[in-house]
Image: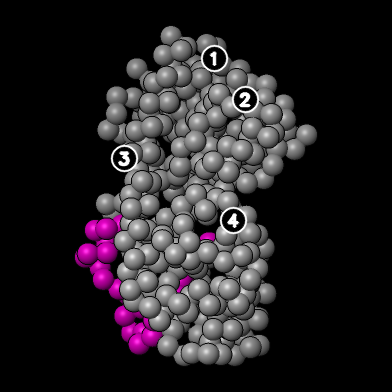
Amino acid sequence: MIRVLHVDTGRVFRGGQRQVNLLIHTLARYDLEQYLACPEGSPLAAAASKAVVKLFPLSKSNFMRFLERREIRHFIEDNRINLVHAHDSHAHTLITIIKAKPAPALVVTRRSSARIGLGSRTKYLAHNIRYIAISKHIRGLLVDGGVPENMVTVISSMIDFESFRKNAVEMGKYEAYREESRKVIISGGAFDHEKGFFDAVRAIQRLSQKRKDFVYYLYGEGTEEKKMREYIRLNNLTEIIRMPGWQKTPAEYLQGGTVFISPSYEEGLNMSIVDAMAAGVPVVVTNIEPHAENVIDHKSGLLFNPGDINGMATAAGKILDDSNLASGLISEGLKVAERHDCRRVAGRIYDLYCELVACRD
């Protein structure tokens, strides 16, 4: 019997926590017991509690989690946990300092596109950890950082593809768009510099100087939000650009979109693109390595160079003008999205669990 402890230290419910929750619920169909360590009272704890045997309530601060490592070790030993799966960087650090006996197999999902620094090499190399890289790009960063190639398995993030398709059939347009007489361009994510959303605002401004048949919905929050809102106000763009805040359910807010734009400079994989494809929305994305793993230019999406405001605006305009182009991109995008379905991806993760636990027995 595989007894796996999932560890996630996130205090809010963002992309990483959505992945953990979906994995836990999809793995429930397999012959294993699942446990979860996450911050007490977190949205993930509430979302996943009925799908796990027990919850371990982590403290909310890194320092306090360090102090409670003995309690975590006892939890692992008392419940005979034979595999620990860390889902974020702080969880990764935590599992390397817990010395349970017998030692469980260790799995870390790596999502970040940051390179392994000299100060963190010990954490990555000294604990016989098996890594799940969510993209070939992330796998390359791990190997470049010194992780042996045979310790890294590429398994992408996942979506509930059936849920997206069901929404597309049953919901039609997202409620917020039903009163719009214009076409809907959408972006969503964390408003950090590397995500490039300020570029997208400027591209939308450029596009609005040529046409008035669209509105732009920019979902999310983050460090650049204030700057973007001020720019929108000062440039009289409030009739073109909407910023509704962070939304937990992309399967809903993507419905009825005409174009999805991702202007990122850096990504691990970028599941927002896959979400849009699953919802039947053609994508316009930066030509960076992680995006190119899912988007072939003029086949499953349109590519533009990072920071190219004109290129972004031109690509979005092409889709607004050409329904045949849009239909072709939607058809190919659905094929890409289906490859990320949770039933396929969770099956690969379960196979990895079986391999690692069998090696320990």
Pointer 1 and pointer 3: residues touching (CB < 8 Å)? no
In this view, the residue in front, 171 or 319, is 319
Question: Viewed as shown, does residue 91 lie left or right of 281?
Answer: right
**The C terminus is located in which quarter?**
top left
- Alpha carbon separation for disc pair 1 and 3: 29 Å
Pointer 3 and pointer 2: residues touching (CB < 8 Å)? no
- Alpha carbon separation for disc pair 1 and 2: 21 Å
Pointer 4 and pointer 3: residues touching (CB < 8 Å)? no
Residue annotated with mark 4:
288
In this view, the residue in front, 292 or 278, is 292
Residue annotated with mark 2:
148
Question: Viewed as shown, does residue 335 lie left or right of 211?
Answer: left
Secondary element at tag 4: loop
Please tell me whether mark 4 or mark 3 is closer to you in this view. 4
Q: Is residue 49 visible to us here?
A: no
Position of residue 356 measured from the top left corner of the image (x, y, whole percent): 46, 19
Position of residue 282 measured from the top left corner of the image (x, y, whole percent): 40, 67
Pointer 4: residues within 10 angstroms few (<14), some, or many (20+)? some
Which three-letter amino acid code belongs to the residue tagged 1?
Answer: Ala
- Alpha carbon separation for disc pair 1 and 4: 39 Å
Q: In terms of sequence position, does the residue under pointer 1 or pointer 2 come before the other?
A: 1
Please tell me whether mark 1 or mark 2 is closer to you in this view. 2
- Alpha carbon separation for disc pair 3 and 2: 28 Å
Q: In terms of sequence position, does the residue under pointer 1 or pointer 3 come before the other?
A: 1
Task: Magenta stretch: give its range.
Answer: 164-191
In this view, the residue in front, 239 or 140, is 140
The disc placed on residue 343 is 3
Q: In the rendered view, would you say 167 is above or below 240?
A: above
